[in-house]
Each structure stands twice: as C-alpha cells, then as structure tokens.
Amino acid sequence: MKNNDERLALLRDAPPAEAVIRLGVPLILGLCIMVFYNLVDTYFIGLMKDDYQLAAVNFAYPVMMVSVAISNMVGTGAASLIARSLGAGDQNKADHTVTTAFLLTLVNSLLVTAAGLLLLPQIVRGLGAGDDTFAYTSQYVSIILMGSIFTMGSYTLGALLRSEGAVMKSVAGMIAGTLTNIVLDPLFIFHLGMRIRGAAVATVLGNAVSLLVSLLFYLSGRTLLRPRLRYLRPTAEILGEIFWVGVPATLETLLTSAAYILNDRLAAHYSDLNVAAMGVAQKILSFGSYVYQGFAAGTQPIMGYNYGARNYARMLRVLRAGVLIVSGTEGMVLLVCGVFAPQLIDIFSDNAVTIATGTQVLRAIMWILPFVGAISMSRMSFQAMGKPQYAFGITLVRQLFLYVPLLLIFDRVFGFSGMIWAQPVTEAIMMAASVSLLAWVIRREEKKGTA
C-alpha cells in the first residue's frame, strides 16, 4: 500500500516540475528503447542491401499506426476515466474501467486481424506500394496483422498502468519487448533466411513479450487497480466515457496516419528511394518524438487526477512546467540531428542517393521539435480532463486544415525540397494556438468551480 500511496501523492502533491520529470523521464527512456522496434528492423533490413525492402517497411508503418490508434481508443479513454475516478476517490469505478478495457482490447484485436487479412491486397495498394515493393509490403503487413492482439494489448495495458502512476511498470514491458525484438531480428532475417518476413515475426513476438510482462503485474497484484470477474459486464456509463474520450483519440491517430500515407505517396512520385530516405529520417527523428510523447504521457495522469480533484491551480502550474521542460529538451535533440544528420542516415543505408535525400529530410523535419511537444501535451491534457472535443479540434485543424493543404501547396510550388517543410510550419502555428486554448479552458473551469 505504501507504493500506491506514494503514486497518488506524486500526482497530488509533488512540485509540478518534479512530477512531470519523475513521470516523464522513465517513460521517455522506455519509448527511446522501444523505438528500436522500428530502427532495428530498418537496420537489419538495410544490411540486405535492398532499399525496396527498406521502403516496404515504411509503406507498412501506417498499418501499425492504425492498430495503435484503435488501442488508443481504449487505452486513452480508459486511462482518462481511471485518473479522474482516482482523483474523485472512486476506486470501484476505476477497477471496473480496467476490466472493461481488457475486454474491449481482445474484441478489437480480433476484428482488426480478420478485416485486415480479408482486405490485404487492397490495403497494400492503398498504402502506395508499387510493383517493386508490393510483395515485400504484403509479407510484412500480413504478419503484423496476425499479431494484432499482442500489439494492441501491449499498448493498451501500458496506458492503463500509466493512468495509475505506475510508469516504471509500463516501461518494463516496453524494454522486455524491445530486447526480444533486437535478439530475434538477426536470427529470423539472416540465420533462418526469412528476410523481411523475419523482421515482422520478430516485431510481433516482441509485442507478445511486452504484453505478457504487463499482464504479470496485474495478475500478481502489484498494481493499484485490478481487473475483476464481477466487472466483466461493462456498464453503459463506462463504455460511454471510454468511447467519448477514446474515439476522438483514435480519429486523431487515423488522421495522422492518413497524412503520413499522403506524404509517402507524394514522395513516391519522385522515387521509391525518396520514400526509403523519408522513412529512415522519420525513424531517427522518432527519438525526439518520444521525448515529447513521454513528457506528454507523463503529464496526462497528473492533469486527469487533479481535474477530478478540482485542483485547477495545480493544473496550470503543471502545464507551464511541462511546456518549458519539453521545449528545452527538444532543442538539444534538434541540435544533435542537425549536426550529425549524414552520419545518422548512413547507419541505415549505404546508397548515396538515400543518404543525401535522408539528410535533407532530417534537417528539415527536425524543426518540428521545439513546437510539437507543447501541442501533444495540450491534446493529452484535454483527453485526461474528459474533453476530447478540444483535443480532436486541435488535430483536425493541425492535420486537415493546415498540414495537408501546406503539403500539397509546397509540393506543387517547390517540389520535394518544399514538401518536407510543410510539417515544421504547421507545428509552429499550432503550438501557440493549442497552449493558449488549454490555459483558457482550465481558467474557465476554475471560474465555474468558484462561482
């Protein structure tokens, strides 16, 4: 019980900067390790000296994003309700929500596998794979789809653990899964001769291990919350709360996936090697992305708990501390990417065109880093507060009304060299808008509470 009390005290009483760092940094380390899921595949596939297989992994990435999006529907919706329930002192509702999230994850993963395999050729063509990459992309995607239960389960349970402040337990699952993937990738790709199929199998098994570790924490009773048989029947209230927050979160990820696909398809008009270069650059930048995602996800349970407890002043202090911490940290990541871009790209490809293009892409898209962390923190805070309409509104404006039009205009006017600057311009505009909106909503709630 002592550890559980310490977790709640961290959410409720710790200085804002300390709380953000203590919850965010372990998660960042776990996410940075987890990035090896994609980087290890990219690295070992690159050793085969076949950039078409490298491009196929990049084409397949949105399928993983869709699985994660559906996981986020359950994980984000349930985590928001759990944090608010704990802040309001309702342990039974929190336990019921965890149980419902387990059940929904199982059902959703089975549906994704069945629908994905049934429509596999259409999906692969829709991703933009051409004749040179179609077979490779199909092999990778089919295996990823068959392992949906592990991918979706590991993401959902990670979000549930974080909702009660158990960040280190969430990170333990990530680390175990990533280490499994690192060990199995060369074994399956080279020693067993499975090539790109081996990379997919290793990824699925890594997710399976991650899920198993998270399940063991729940089964051993080492969590504040526990799934219980008596809560297997979901209530309309809990389902409504989960979907109210979770569906917009899923739509946000799907919009991002759609923009990612559009980006790849535009790049493919120039060359499949451009797609490979963009994929490598984006995966390298994911180290920086996981910095802001870690701080944002670490801030989420703090904001949800204090919103449930109606401690609005603490929420504003946490927001200020979080924005300063994430922007400063990302500035250092930007510096590393800018200085060492050619060397970083060279790790994953020895093709001169891919290296040159990848360097160009990385030095452009790295400029999202000073801005995108505050946007992510604002979105996740709205989700934690049970106000997904604002989070979805940020994403809708960001992706549909800013990024996609800028991407198309910059591509048409400036070509490939222009389109890669569309995202940095978008993020700079959205940072100011999203942080201002969140501060305004919190102050409005505070006034309501004192009226």
Image: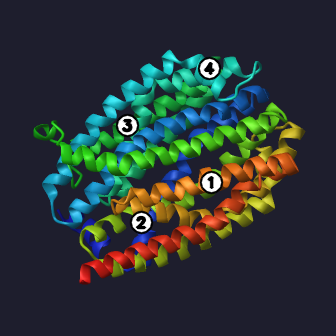
Query: Badges 4 and 2: C-beta atoms under 8 Å apart?
Result: no
Q: Which residue matches tag 4? A: 138
Q: Is residue 197 left or right of residue 241?
A: right
The quarter of the picture where residue 291 lies is: bottom right
Dot placed on the residue nearer the N-terminal end, 4 or 3: 4
Density class for disc 3 (Cα within 10 Å; few <14, some 14-19, many ≥20) is many
In depth, the one of 397 and 275 nearer the eye is 397
What secondary structure is marked by label 3? Answer: helix
Residue 80 percent across, percent down from the top left: 32, 56
Residue density around tag 4, few if under 14, some if 14–19, many if 20 or more, within 10 Å:
many
Crowding near the residue tagged with mark 2, few <14, some 14–19, many ≥20 C-alpha atoms within 10 Å: many
Residue located beneath label 3 in the image? 153
Residue type at mark 1: give it.
Phe
Answer left or right for 435 relative to 190. Answer: left
Q: Secondary structure at mark 2?
A: helix
Say if residue 25 shows up in the picture: no
Q: Label 4 sits on what residue type? A: Ser
Looking at the image, which residue is at 26% across and 55% down? 82
| Residue for badge 1 | 401
Q: Which residue is mark 2?
A: 299
